[in-house]
Image: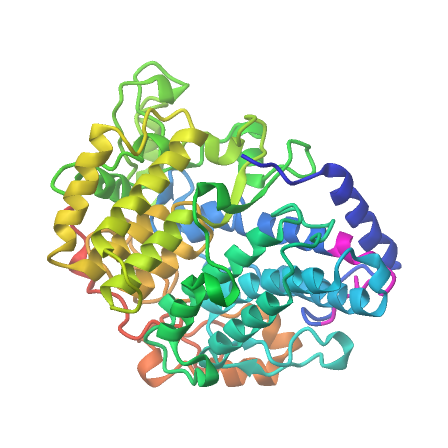
Amino acid sequence: MRRHVTLTLLVAGGLSVLLALGGCDSLTSYNENPNEATSANPNNLLANAQRYMSGEVYAGTNMMRRSNVWAQYTTQNFYPSESRYSPVDYPWTDFYTRLTDLSTAKQIAKERPGTVQNQGNFQAVATIMQTWAFQILTDAYGDIPFDEALQQRGNQSPAYTAQADIYPALVDSLNAALSKINTGAAGPSGDLVNGGNMEMWQKFANGLKMRIALRGYDLNANWGDLGGPESIISNAVDPNVNGEPLTSNADNVYFQFTTSATHRNTYYENREVDTRDDFDGSARFIDFMKDKYGGTADPRLDAYFEQTSSSGRPCEDGSGEYEGFPFGQRQGDAQDQYSANPTCTFSRPEAWFPNGPSGQGDAFAPMMYYDEVLLAKAWAAQKGIVSGDAQALIGDAIEASVNFYGNQTDADISGSNSATQDYIDQVQGDFASNPVLVIGEQRYISFYMHNIQGWSTWRRFDFKGVLGAPEGGVAGGFDSYAPLRVPYPASEANLNGENYTDAANKCSGDFQGSGSSESGAQNEDEDCRVAWDVDGPPSNDAYSAD
């Protein structure tokens, strides 16, 4: 697998920002970046934005204590309050800071074209990164500052843009970026994701268009000249328009951390450096992978989780069993259960996820993998949007995912072995009776450790049989058994109060539940849904192993 990150470039980027900082010691507004670097090298700003946004989404806190537990992939085993959704928050200021850095980098590149190798390619890469980040923000929060954001001192109180308007704008941005890409010219020297490979950025942009269109399929939006989600997907897969999306595992898009103490991922810091044992696989997710499809176990179990063992670590040399920890117990119950059992009674996430290929923290922060594209094509084929055999595409997606993790981890799996084929046959059999449900389930399984994508997939497809109320009850002050969106940060009430209140007040009617409002908001309810989550979750009694 390729490795793009270079410590030298990250250090240089960090120095450019520090030099531009000029003594500022605090953010006065998420939309006013005191690090505004009018003399910085745009390549360094790009590198830092890629590194630090990846660090936000693939982190000991924002992934392991936030997005993973919202999707109920994993659970805390000793201090489980965050597995019971207390608190529910996600990066806001740091994301907007890096989005502003990307905007600044684009401006500097235009004003000083000699600082970049190819203007069109630089602008395209920075725009695609912004689009990726903005979709994460709007899928977490709903309406967010968008049209008026990133103006720095030009507008420190930006209005919130409706998600129904953001989604078409994201596709417009991707189309504009694709039109600038020259695959025959060099990409940015500061590109730590794809190493300046513009064919890869072309594929990623088309894949993002598919992700946006699939998730926004039921969104009541004015798609305008885009023609709607069907046209967006048709154009994204047509190689004669602007290239095509990912075509193999070799195209998988991710940020790879380094092994240095400064730039390795924080999940590694928690598990290996601090030697903490905070996270186990959720019993619900592990049971789902073991039993959902006629008792035929998902072959990725050994890649996703360590085996149990009666002899202690390393658990992956254990008995070949997979046992999850009860999801979201009360603290006393969780601590009693954890303390009463040997170290490897429950399956931890596979060590590769924090450790990376070297075992020293150079993990992958996924942005898009090939199996996602195949499953999007399967969904589109089932809808009649694109040609192809949806069942065959699902099988191809499972095989691609199995092969990727089999190659990366110590898991003894491959897409060609009989256990994998048995699993594919069972999934394809279930597809015949409920195709949309199976596509949603398979996307959910494949999005393990992919920032908020798994949680968003559950909200989008509303499939039953996995998520349910935490064992110890919801501690976050809302009625739903899993979060439906992230409440706006309290800092917004202080820094952008009028617009924040307007956005919070929109959480009413069809998009508001009956839970208690968060402190500082008007009517912003923690059960308020994002606009594309048109149906809300299945009933709370939907959780079962069948």
Q: Quadrant of residue 17?
A: bottom right
Nearest the eye: 456 or 370: 370
Residue 536 in percent (x, y) is at 28, 70
Q: Residue at x 64, y 67 (%)?
A: 180
Is residue 529 among what the camera can see?
A: no
| Residue found at the far front of this picture | 240
| Residue found at the far top of this picture | 311
Nearest the eye: 169 or 320: 169
Is residue 315 among what the camera can see?
A: yes
In the picture, measured across the screen, residue 65 lies left or right of residue 13, that is left
Magenta-span inclusion, residue 362: no
In the picture, measured across the screen, residue 205 lies left or right of residue 197, that is left
Report the number of numbered marks: 0
Q: Main secondary structure of the magenta part?
A: loop
Residue 359 in percent (x, y) is at 54, 26
In the picture, measured across the screen, residue 147 lies left or right of residue 390, that is right
Nearest the eye: 480 or 115: 115
Residue 428 in percent (x, y) is at 17, 48
Colour approach in the figure: rainbow
Magenta-span inclusion, residue 33: yes
**215 lies above or below 9:** below
In the picture, measured across the screen, residue 284 lies left or right of residue 493, that is left
Q: Which residue is drawn at 21% across and 30% down?
A: 419
Magenta residues, start to end: 32-45
Residue 241 in percent (x, y) is at 49, 67
